[in-house]
Image: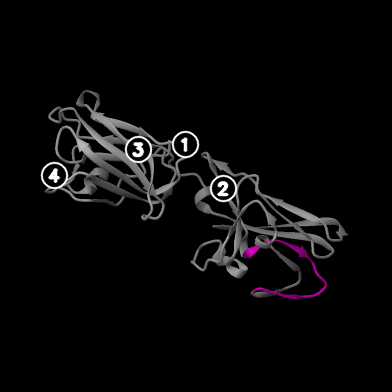
Amino acid sequence: MRKVQHTMALHDRHTPRRVRAWCATFTTAGLVGALLGAAGTGAHAAPAPAARATAGATTPFTPVEAETALTDGTRIDPDHTQGTPASEASGRRAVRLSAGQSVEFTLPEAANALNVAYSVPDGDGNPDPDPGRNLAKGRPATATGHADVYAPGRAVDGDPASYWESTNHAFPQSLTVDLGKAEAVRRLVLKLPPAAAWEARTQTLSVQGSSDGSGYATPAASKAYRFDPATGNTVTVALPADSPRVRHLRLSVTANSGWPAAQFSEVEAYLS
């Protein structure tokens, strides 16, 4: 998270007036960076005649807390979790602004400058170093079960000849991949070994996702997908553009016409 401060000089010493701080839009690789109030403060009227006691410090200006101002953003309740924007704010509260949202307040007294402080989360504002990479490759994978040596890690090892196979005769079965952080996954590529010995088959599956590994949404409902060695034993699953970001990506399989188990040699996840 990057902390930023801007000081804006006023041409005259203004008496109380309304001030609006807007959220700018940071677009890189199609991502919009959110602005958050750092130190719990959206802006300060400054300088005041003498030092003033505030939450956590004595300052020579009058603080105005973003979370108590008029805003169409999202107020973040008190949070003491280390590293979160609110945890670094006075009172452990802050305001999250998306593009076009604002914080509006009235200066409590005459001022000749404004000091506006905010933070930009690195994750949303910075581009992926390789936006075309497979987000699932090499990531930790777990499953409801596996047969013999065909462990879940084989579905994310980058080797199309190795594969995960679930416990046999025990549908439904699922494979879950931890992407490491929440990602805007928009496309999955699912594979079986390309060898002709793997005859064509249809697997019925749904795609689920979670940001924390507990509650799961279903961006792709259950559907039958045909894997055919004539076309590389590969299928593509497109996820809706408005799908929430997911860290934990889960494939839930309820049927396989070619074998009584779920099977994948590679599960690949992409941003586009």
2 and 1 marks in contact (CB < 8 Å): no
For numbered disc 2, what is the local secondary structure? loop
Q: Residues within 10 Å of mark 2 (few under 14, many from 20)?
A: many
For numbered disc 1, what is the local secondary structure? loop
- Residue identified by numbered label 4: 168
Height in image: 109 above or below 166?
Answer: below
- Residue identified by numbered label 1: 241
For numbered disc 3, what is the local secondary structure? strand
Instruction: Indicate which disc residue 212 carries.
Output: none
Give yes or no for residue 86 being in the magenta stretch: no
Q: Provide the residue span drawn in magenta.
A: 40-55
Of mark 3 and mark 4, the one earlier in the sequence is 4
Residue 248 image point, x, y percent:
36, 50
Residue 233 image point, x, y percent:
23, 30
- Residue identified by numbered label 3: 221
Three-letter residue code for mark 1: Ala
Farthest residue, direction top: 230
Question: Count the marks: how many?
Answer: 4
How far, Cα to Cα, is label 3 from label 1? 15 Å
- Residue identified by numbered label 2: 33
Of mark 4 and mark 2, the one earlier in the sequence is 2
Give the quadrant of the C terminus.
top left
How far, Cα to Cα, is label 4 from label 2? 45 Å
How far, Cα to Cα, is label 3 from label 2? 30 Å
Of mark 2 and mark 1, the one earlier in the sequence is 2
Kindly identify the residue that appears in the image at 19 percent across and 34 percent down. Answer: 193
In terms of depth relative to the viewer, which is nearer, 239 or 23? 239
Three-letter residue code for mark 3: Ala
Of mark 3 and mark 2, the one earlier in the sequence is 2
Q: Mark 3 or 2, which is nearer the eye?
A: 3
Q: Quadrant of residue 32?
A: top right
